[in-house]
Amino acid sequence: MQLLLVEDDLEAANLLAGGLSDAGHTVHHVVTGEDGLARVVSTPYDALIVDRMLPGMDGLTLIQEIRARGIGVPVLILSALGQVDDRITGLRAGGDDYLVKPYHLSELQARLEALVRRAAEGTTTTRLQVADLELDLLKREVRRGDKRIDLTPREFRLLEFLMRYAGQVVTRKMLLEHVWGYHFDPQTNVIDVHMSRLRQAIGDDRSAPLLHTVRGAGYMLGPGAAEQH
Amino acid sequence: MRAASGERAGAGPLRRALPAPRTTGGRLATVLTTAALVVLFLGLLAYLLAGPLVAWQSERSIDARMNSFVALHARVDPRTFGGVVATRSVVDAEQGVEYSLRAPNGVTVVGRLLEEGWAAAPGQGRIEFTQPDLVRPERGPRRMVGRVAALPDGSRLLIAHDLDRRARAALAVGAAALLGMVGAMLFAALVAWAVARRTGERLDAISLAMTRLLAGDLSHRLPTVGHAGIDRLAAEFNVALDRIERLTATMRAVADSTAHDLRTPLNRLRAAVEIALSREDDPAELRAALDTVLVEVDRVQNTLEALLRIALAESGTAPIEPVDLTAVVADVEELYKPLAEEKGLGFATQIEPGLELPGNRQLLAQAAANLIDNAIKFTPAGGRVRLTAAARPEGIVLEVRDTGPGIAPEDRERALERSRRLANAAGKPGSGLGLSLVNAVARLHGGRFELADNAPGLVARLVFGRDPERAAALARSPAPTVRAP
């Protein structure tokens, strides 16, 4: 992916750009919102990573300027402000996701990939399929091969989210936010228990699992072994 | 740190913005002084107009007297008439009115003090003349105005006024009135000045208190000065100060506990990094050391997150909206039920439908989650956790009962404070800030959080009062925002 990073903290930017390059992405880094805008207008990026606090034109203004020009590139906002209304203002300004500093590199990568995927696919899908696992959003039905699988509404949403981002790492934080609507971390890893229940429900086989745990990052749905992050 | 410097920076402009002292009393004094000056001016005007006014009024009064005497003359005989004139002459002399009656033969019968008048008025009609004061010659001549009337029997009557004397009398009355008015004005001005001074002193006391407050002594309160209006204002101000002090204390406590809570993991972090640096030749050990680093970094991050959450709840700046508590609790129950079952705990719930209150959904959910999380964490396998949400007479009650070790009565207070991990919490995951957050969330919603004995185990109970709308509004009264640096 070709990414633009707008961040005035040089040290943080170098670490982040390094991590993203290692993961195979091309990263352009600029320090000011003005430079960011100039870049976005001239170059088609897959996604933007924008720090909220920037000297001169701040991150939110930059995003508004980009949206005002009709550019729909996915934007991930980075911010030290983590309160609920800060998140809302960020998303309202035209950001697509909001990540509070300090964050894990794996968290950022997972979200970035999810954003790009979402932008590419749109939301018109009514049927999701991963290997022999099928999920029908209209009938609200899940099948694995010929077998019909009964899920609670929450399990259905959980599986839907995992299938939407199949082949990608989704973090526990992402699941809490999108499946439960919580912007806080429970003290105990409750998500893990839900995942093991989901595993049982979809009849996941230990020898050839669909739902993988990615150590130190989260989960991934897809055939084959999970890559270790 | 940032908050402290902001406070210091804020003191300057605040002090500069204070307007020059202008008191109600001072303004009153100005108004009264102006009024006194106006009265003095009018008095001077009256003094200058007094002469002409008195002359005009004298002539009218002479005309009136003359008419009544002419009428009398027609009714009585000349001797009686002479007697009446003589009597009136004596009576009215005090008012500066003189009479003189001349018989048809030209002999003055009554009033010998007006010879000059007779000389000036051989006929009849209005006359002006100067008459030497025969009674008190030292006073000099008198300016007189008068009228002569010819009576039917041929005698003539002269009635004259001593202009100076009447003017003096009028002026004396006017001056008395004027003096009275000016005196009243001066007195009022004096009172106003005194009031202004007292008000000023009262305000000075308040101003002094403000200076001390701005200097950072937030425990100081405005004094009661014995003036209903000012005292009410001071009382309201003191309430605001109570809140500011509490918030400042909260911020200070957040800063303190942040420092305290972060120091330990940061120390461990440093040690882990040092170990990692010394093990660079052994990849496995290096990796293990870096894993430790990651765990400690996560711990720092969790603690920071928890502290900021508490600060958000305590500052009262979290957005408040109508919350369906039934749904919030049901969602949290659903989130934790598998965990409880996995641990081999009995998990019973009883959630009443239709529980609503104004609040912050995220914080309420987190409070409920923390209570259940705690109960599950500390209750050994085979135990029971019971979650109840219900409307009771005292308000909406959210209760989590467990059969774990509980918290000793003497430790319950401390369990709600920040950074107080009780002895039996060692080795359990979590920042140790879970119950502090619940406590802060309770207060944000105008409710209370209490811990009790479940014999055995713990009862953690959140009570949101009957009038949560008002309570929430109270909690949301203007307050500084506590934010991440």
Image (spheres, helix red, strand yellow):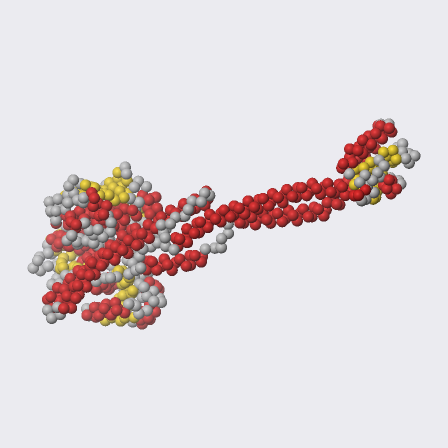
Q: Indicate the position of residue B446 as horizontal and vertical percent values.
A: 31, 45
Residue A124's image quarter?
A: bottom left
In this orientation, which residue lies closer to the viewer: B236 or A170?
A: B236
Quadrant position of the N terminus of chain B in the picture: bottom left
Q: Say if residue A183 shows up in the picture.
A: no
* Left or right: B476 in relation to B382: right
Which residue reaches farthest right? Answer: B105
Q: Indicate the position of residue A12 as horizontal and vertical percent values.
A: 25, 67
Q: Indicate the position of residue B458 as horizontal and vertical percent values.
A: 18, 43
Residue B287's image quarter?
A: bottom left
Q: Say if residue B168 shows up in the picture.
A: yes
Which residue reaches farthest left? Answer: A207
Quadrant position of the C terminus of chain B in the picture: bottom left
* Left or right: B172 in relation to B1: right
Which residue reaches farthest front? Answer: B138
Q: For the point 60% across and 43% down, which residue is it? A: B184
* Left or right: B461 in relation to A41: left
Q: For the point 82% across and 32% down, which residue is it? A: B85
In this orientation, which residue lies closer to the viewer: B64 or B338?
A: B64
In this orientation, which residue lies closer to the viewer: A163 or B286?
A: B286
Label tally: 0
Q: For the point 56% across and 46% down, which residue is it? A: B190
In this orientation, which residue lies closer to the viewer: A106 or B298?
A: B298
Q: For the point 21% across and 41% down, which residue is it? A: B452
Q: Indicate the position of residue A171 as horizontal and vertical percent values.
A: 19, 59
